[in-house]
Amino acid sequence: MPHITVDYSAPLDRRGFALALHPIVVETVDARLAACVTSFREVEETVTGDGTGAPALVHVDIALLPGRTPEAKARLSAAVLDLLPRYLKDTEGVGLSAEVRDLDPSYAKG
């Protein structure tokens, strides 16, 4: 099950982004659409370095069951970064990042 978590402090069309992202996840790492779950966490404040860096951010974390190649995960990270600007009100000064990783072997679903 792709667990997708988005931390954001910039104005983001959350629903639109998730609905656009899920098919990309399916296509890129061979997941099931119904298994894609995206959660959003609004970040109240960010402080970067000495305080002069990007004041806003969007970070997308995608955790997958093991078995995808590093190349597939890198393609998905790149696709996320390509998609994000379409769902942000303004991208100027916004730090964008993405990570695609394997779920820990301790992962269990009830």
Image (cartoon, helix red, strand yellow):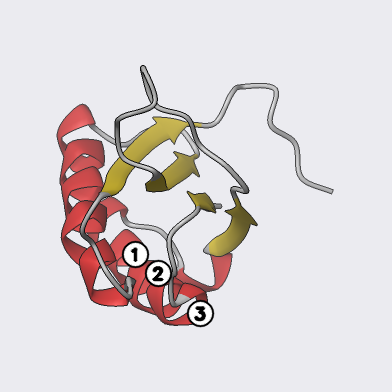
Cα distance between the residues tagged 3 and 1: 17 Å
Up the image or down, 68 lies above or below 3; here it is above
User: What residue lies at 28% left-to-right and 46% top-to-bottom?
Assistant: 96
- 78 sits to left or right of 51: left
The structure residue drawn at horizontal position 23% and vertical position 32%, both measured from the top left corner, is 69
Q: CA distance from mark 3 to mark 2?
A: 11 Å
Measuring from the top left, give residue 90's x and y in whole percent.
27, 69
Residue contact at pointers 2 and 1, CB within 8 angstroms = yes
Per the image, label 1 sits on a secondary structure element best described as: helix
Disc 3 marks a residue whose amino acid type is Arg
The residue that disc 2 covers is 22
For label 3, the residue is 15
Seen in the picture, residue 62 relative to 20 is either above or below; the reply is above
Q: Closer to the observer: label 3 or label 1? A: 3
Q: Quadrant of residue 37?
A: bottom right
Q: Amino acid at mark 1?
A: Val
For image coordinates 36% across by 18% down, the residue present is 49
Q: Nearer the viewer, mark 2 or mark 1?
A: 2
List the residue tagged with mark 1.
26
Amino acid on which disc 2 is placed: His
Foreground residue, 43 or 34? 43
Image: 109 above or below 17: above
Q: Position of residue 103 (x, y in %)?
A: 54, 31
* Mark 3 or mark 2: whose residue is earlier in sequence: 3
74 to the left or right of 37: left
Considering only order in the chain, which callout, 1 or 3, is on the residue closer to the N terminus? Answer: 3
Name the residue located 76 percent from the left edge and 45 percent from the top edge: 109
- Badge 3 marks a residue whose secondary structure is helix
Front disc: 3 or 2: 3
Q: CA distance from mark 2 to mark 1?
A: 6 Å
